[in-house]
Amino acid sequence: MGRRTGKFRPSLQRGLLLFAVCAGLLEAPAFVAVPSENASPSRRGLLGLLVLAQAPAAEAKRPEGVNRPELLPKTDAATTPVIDVARILTNSQERELAGYIAEIETAAKVRLRVLTQTFPNTPGLAIRDYWKPDGRTVIYVHDTGGLGDGYVVNFNAGSEVEKMKPLTYWRQVQNTYGNRYYIRDHGDGDTVIDVVKALKEGLTPEANSK
């Protein structure tokens, strides 16, 4: 599979939120700012790489950047849309996720990738080189508690995906599935399934036309 040429725009990287650091896509800055809902798009950056719907800026953490390629699978990235570092998924759940992800890519031309982690146990920066996210990529990071209750369901959306859905959409998905009560009642594995099903319904034209 050829290297994808689309990239996240450097000018937007200045507006990165906490997720990019937590997932290890960028080195940790000295201070992580969380733009308000009313901030301009240039300040929010990439559709709020992390949509902080539940945690106020004052409580934002300042985790160090992580780069642990040894946590990546040995399989080819093109055939590995799910990386379960936290080991919360069964084999059947991973197969189910792969099916939904394939449907999203076929119908919406969006590359969805799923990473489960318990920060700081994450591949971190290595994910960027492994999956090579571009403008039509969404990385969903499910953190099982290492970042705190407000940072379980996290999204990193490319610039083209950013245009497909408003910030409120990502906030709604995060609020619905990323709260402690939902995860308590459904468990982390089923929550990951439910988030991906919600993304499938939200991103695919067929689902939206019903």
Image (cartoon, grey):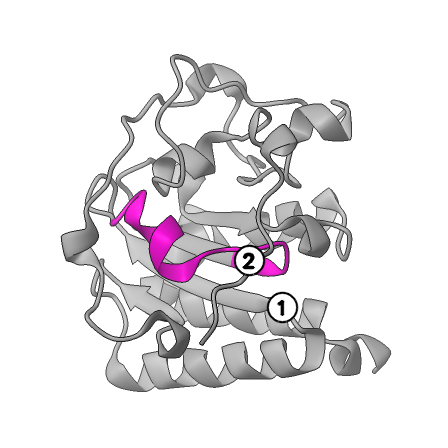
Label 2–label 1 contact, CB within 8 A: yes
Q: Mark 2 vs mark 1: which is more N-terminal?
A: 1
The image quarter containing residue 105 is bottom right
Residue 48, compared with residue 184, is above or below; it is above
Give coordinates of residue 154: x percent, y percent: 48, 47
Give coordinates of residue 147: x percent, y percent: 32, 36
Is residue 65 visible in the rendered image? The answer is: yes
Residue 95, compared with residue 47, is above or below; it is below
Q: Is residue 127 left or right of residue 88?
A: right
Magenta extent: 123-138
Let me know if residue 133 is in the magenta part: yes
Q: Which mark is residue 163?
A: none
The residue lying at 17 percent from left, 56 percent from top is 71
Give coordinates of residue 5: x percent, y percent: 57, 57
Of residues 108 and 203, which is closer to you in this image?
108
Which residue, given by chain and number where applicable, does mark 1 sit on? 110
Please state which amino acid type lies under the numbered disc 1.
Val
Give coordinates of residue 6: x percent, y percent: 60, 55
The image quarter containing residue 205 is bottom right
Q: Is residue 177 left or right of residue 23?
A: right
Residue 66, compared with residue 138, is above or below; it is above
Question: Element type at marker 2?
Answer: strand
The residue lying at 70 percent from left, 74 percent from top is 108
The residue lying at 24 percent from left, 75 percent from top is 75
Of residues 101 and 154, which is closer to you in this image?
101
Is residue 143 visible in the rendered image? The answer is: no
Of residues 96 and 8, which is closer to you in this image?
8
Q: Residues within 10 Å of mark 2 (few under 14, many from 20)?
A: many
The alpha-carbon separation of the residues under discs 2 and 1 comes to 7 Å
Please state which amino acid type lies under the numbered disc 2.
Val
Which residue, given by chain and number where applicable, does mark 2 sit on? 138
